[in-house]
Image (tube, helix red, strand yellow):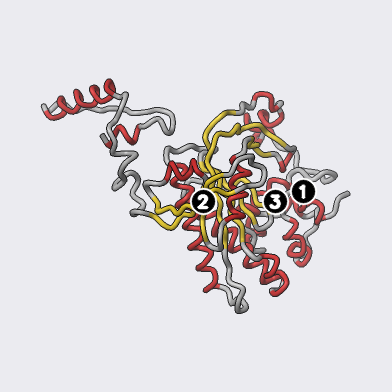
């Protein structure tokens, strides 16, 4: 039967092996481990969820048989073929962030010190990404892959992603005051963000390692952009630039030859926000240009407005796919 290290490696959490060994936790005990137990060990929310989910599927270890009351429609759906799962084509903004100089830190800091710093880094990134409506898709060592626009889409996903990137840089820099690090080894992060069309939704893997695949060049581009970023900076793709230029001060870094891409790609560094985080207020060009092709919708709104001014209360329900222009219509 597999050992603890092999099991943790399969879910990408092998860094916690020594912590569990130090606390006398083995594979036989894992199915009985609680969220509170893992929290006491210092594991992040995401890592606790992964371990608790995977612990229910350890080969060779008997699991509790669910009673009739615990078997519901969700359990039945999980046993069905994934053929009913539908992949979809959508625009996605992908963020890849990485803790810089982690290899150097591992040679200077003790394993326990490095563990605490890594957990703090992951927790800060996860918290910030979720605050900006993002989804942490995967932890890859010191790297974190996040999606903005899946599973829940918003009209301003690209803007939310860039704001999250800037917030992560600030949050990680603040960790330098929390930890007493050797001189010349400050915590720093690099962030790459790309926006593009992808196919998302196909399930890959089995059991606890199963996840929704994202097919397209966007995730790879985000990872490559992260590699181009200087310490504590955010670098974005051309499409992300086009969608966020009215909200942020951007500095062109010129056209770059990026591995895996045939043509050079112009990239930008995000210098900072142009105005406070207040949605569409205060923006120019893209949102204050003449509205085209919405004459019928504008006419409906104006008629309802006239009736309201005459004392007849009106309610208008505005709905549509993300990015179709609902917010722009309301700003008209």
- Name the residue rendered at 65%, 58% in the picture: 142
Q: Position of residue 32 (x, y in %)?
A: 73, 52
Give the CA separation, mark 3 to mark 2: 43 Å
Q: Quadrant of residue 106?
A: bottom right
Residue 40 can be seen in this image: no
Give the mark nearer the N terminus: 3 vs 2.
Answer: 3
Give the mark nearer the N terminus: 2 vs 1.
Answer: 1
Outermost residue, bottom side: 183
Q: Which mark is residue 166?
A: none
Outermost residue, left side: 310
Q: Quadrant of residue 273?
A: bottom left
According to the image, label 2 marks what residue? 254
The one nearer the camera, 280 or 233, is 233
Give the mark nearer the N terminus: 1 vs 3.
Answer: 1
Query: What is the secondary structure assignment of the residue under circle 1?
Result: helix
Residue 98 can be seen in this image: yes
Q: Quadrant of the C terminus?
A: top left
Q: Is 286 drawn above or below residue 145 in the view shown?
A: above
The one nearer the camera, 113 or 195, is 195
- Name the residue rendered at 65%, 66% in the picture: 101
Mark 2 and mark 1 residues within 8 Å of each other at the beta carbon = no
Q: Which mark is residue 51?
A: 3
Is residue 87 toward the left or the right of residue 161 in the image?
A: right
Q: Is 97 drawn above or below residue 329 in the view shown?
A: below
According to the image, label 1 marks what residue? 10
In this view, the mark in front (3 or 2): 2
- Name the residue rendered at 30%, 24% in the picture: 294
Q: Position of residue 137 (x, y in %)?
A: 61, 45
Q: Is 214 drawn above or below residue 24 in the view shown?
A: above
Q: Position of residue 301 (x, y in %)?
A: 24, 26
Q: Is 318 drawn above or below residue 13 in the view shown?
A: above
Q: How many marks?
A: 3
């Amino acid at each position: 039967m597999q050992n603890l290290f092999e099991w943790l490696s399969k879910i990408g959490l092998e860094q916690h092996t020594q912590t569990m060994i130090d606390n006398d936790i083995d594979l036989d005990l894992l199915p009985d481990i609680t969220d509170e137990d893992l929290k006491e060990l210092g594991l992040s929310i995401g890592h606790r969820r992964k371990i608790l989910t995977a612990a229910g599927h350890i080969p060779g270890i008997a699991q509790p048989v669910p009673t009739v009351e615990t078997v519901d429609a969700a359990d039945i759906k999980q046993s069905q073929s994934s053929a009913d799962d539908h992949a979809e084509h959508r625009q996605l903004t992908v963020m890849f962030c990485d803790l810089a100089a982690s290899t150097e830190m591992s040679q200077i800091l003790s394993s326990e010190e490095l563990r605490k710093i890594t957990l703090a880094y992951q927790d800060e990134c996860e918290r910030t990404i979720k605050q900006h409506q993002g989804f942490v898709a995967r932890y890859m060592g010191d790297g974190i892959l996040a999606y903005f626009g899946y599973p829940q889409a918003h009209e301003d996903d690209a803007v939310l992603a860039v704001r999250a990137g800037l917030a992560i840089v600030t949050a990680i820099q603040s960790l330098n005051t929390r930890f007493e690090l050797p001189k010349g080894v400050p915590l720093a992060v690099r962030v790459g963000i790309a926006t593009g069309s992808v196919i998302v939704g196909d399930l890959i893997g089995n059991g606890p390692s199963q996840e929704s695949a994202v097919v397209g060049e966007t995730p790879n581009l985000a990872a490559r952009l992260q590699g181009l970023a200087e310490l504590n900076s955010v670098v974005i793709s051309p499409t992300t630039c086009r969608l966020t230029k009215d909200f942020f001060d951007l500095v062109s870094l010129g056209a770059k030859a990026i591995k895996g891409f045939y043509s050079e790609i112009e990239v930008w560094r995000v210098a900072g926000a142009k105005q406070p985080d207040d949605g569409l207020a205060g923006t120019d060009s893209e949102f204050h240009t003449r509205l085209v092709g919405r004459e019928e919708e504008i006419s409906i709104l104006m008629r309802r407005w006239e009736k309201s001014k005459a004392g007849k209360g009106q309610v208008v329900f505005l709905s549509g796919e993300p990015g179709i222009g609902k917010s722009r219509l309301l700003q008209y």
